[in-house]
Image (spheres, grey):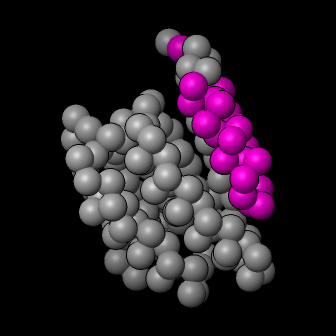
Amino acid sequence: MNPLIIQPTIDSPYVYLDKQNNQFEISGKSLPENVNIFYQPIIDWFNEYFRNPNEETVINFKLDYLNTASSKALLSLLLVVEDAVKNGHHARIKWYYEEDDEDMKDIGEEYSNIIQVPFEIIQIDNE
């Protein structure tokens, strides 16, 4: 399975999904002009990946900002992960936020309450 790598822009996050190296990360700002066009390939990639996933999958979210439309798209992605877990696959989410960013912490907590996936919320110290 080919990796999916999307370079960041001013309004879209960095995406690095690599089954072979067992690395899955979405980071940066997420407010793309057309959220569906941006996130659909990511959702499709994970749907394909979870047909034959690695023994354990840890998806790292290191977002600085996301708009409402991105939030809904991420929920769709997280529901794909939840389906995989319900089907017996081992997956978990690591949601990173900067210590002074209560909004991103709150969003992570909301997601962790909505989906039935092991979910870790991790504070990053400001430098």
Vertical position of residue 15 compared to residue 100: above or below: below
Residue placed at 56% from the left, 30% from the top?
104
Q: Position of residue 66 (x, y in %)?
A: 43, 37
User: Picture coordinates of residue 94 (x, y %)?
Assistant: 64, 46
The answer to whether one can see residue 55 in this image is no
Q: Is residue 14 visible?
A: yes
**Residue 90 part of the magenta segment:** no
Q: Point out residue 95 in the picture as x, y percentages from the top left corner.
A: 62, 42
Residue plotted at (44% across, 30% down) = 64
Residue 105 drawn in magenta: yes
The magenta-colored residue range is 103-126
Q: Nearer the viewer, residue 8 or 30?
A: 30
| Rendered residue at 61%/76% (across/down) | 54
- Between 85 and 55, the residue placed more toward the observer is 85
Q: How many marks?
A: 0
Figure quadrant of the N terminus? bottom left
> What residue lies at 34% left-to-right and 69% top-to-bottom?
41
**Horizontal side, residue 72 vs residue 35: left or right:** right
Taking 112 as reference, is 50 left or right? Answer: left
